[in-house]
């Protein structure tokens, strides 16, 4: 069944709102995630498996990519999302908390 125009408009607005909220918490999530050795595990495993490729990449690429991978790990593991939310609950706005709760329930 093909979505109607009104449904598509609702989806688009939801995506825009979610993107804005994600953008507002991106820096705190990345900063928190790169400080957690366990969260960086996925990136470090990748580097070990792809050592030849990793050695060819510029050093600044590693730092940026490590942060992005670590940040992604926060959202796909509900326990990590819960820890981030708990540690930053006083600093986050209500819509940011709501989105994080959504990720906890739907990693």
Image (spheres, rainbow, N blue to C red):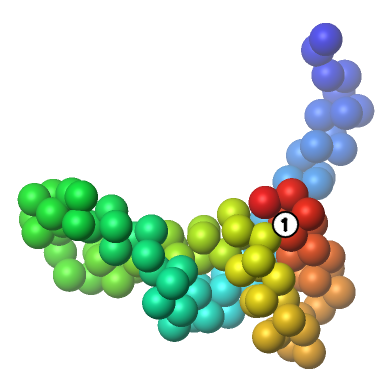
- Quadrant for residue 8, please give it: top right
Front residue (pair 75, 49): 49
- Quadrant for residue 89, please give it: bottom right
Residue 69: percent from left, percent from top = 42, 60
Q: Report the side of 69 relative to 24 (left or right).
A: left
Report the residue that reaches farthest toward the bottom: 90
Residue 102: percent from left, percent from top = 79, 56
Q: Secondary structure at mark 1?
A: helix
Residue 22: percent from left, percent from top = 66, 62
Q: Report the side of 55 relative to 21 (left or right).
A: left
Query: How many residues crowd mark 1 within 10 Å: few (<14), some (14–19), many (20+)?
Result: some
Query: What residue is drawn where x is 88% and y is 28%?
Result: 7
Query: What residue is drawn where x is 83% and y is 10%?
Result: 1
Query: What residue is drawn where x is 13% and y is 54%?
Result: 51
Front residue (pair 39, 65): 39
Front residue (pair 24, 76): 76
Residue 67: percent from left, percent from top = 41, 69
Is residue 42 positioned above or below 26 on the image?
Answer: above
Residue 10 appears in the rendering: yes
Is residue 88 positioned above or below 61 on the image?
Answer: below
Residue 65 appears in the rendering: no
Q: Report the side of 79 relative to 48 (left or right).
A: right
Total number of numbered discs in the rendering: 1
Report the residue that reaches farthest toward the right: 6
Residue topped by disc 1: 103
Query: What residue is drawn where x is 86% and y is 74%?
Result: 94
């Amino acid at each position: 069944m093909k979505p109607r125009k009104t449904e598509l408009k609702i989806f688009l607005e939801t995506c825009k709102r979610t993107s804005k909220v994600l953008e507002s918490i991106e820096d705190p999530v990345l900063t928190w995630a790169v400080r957690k050795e366990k969260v960086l595990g996925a990136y470090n495993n990748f580097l070990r498996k792809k050592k030849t490729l990793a050695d060819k990449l510029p050093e600044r690429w590693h730092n940026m990519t490590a942060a992005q991978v670590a940040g992604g790990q926060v959202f796909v593991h509900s326990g990590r999302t819960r820890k981030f939310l708990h540690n930053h609950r006083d600093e986050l706005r209500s819509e940011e908390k709501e989105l994080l709760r959504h990720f906890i329930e739907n990693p």
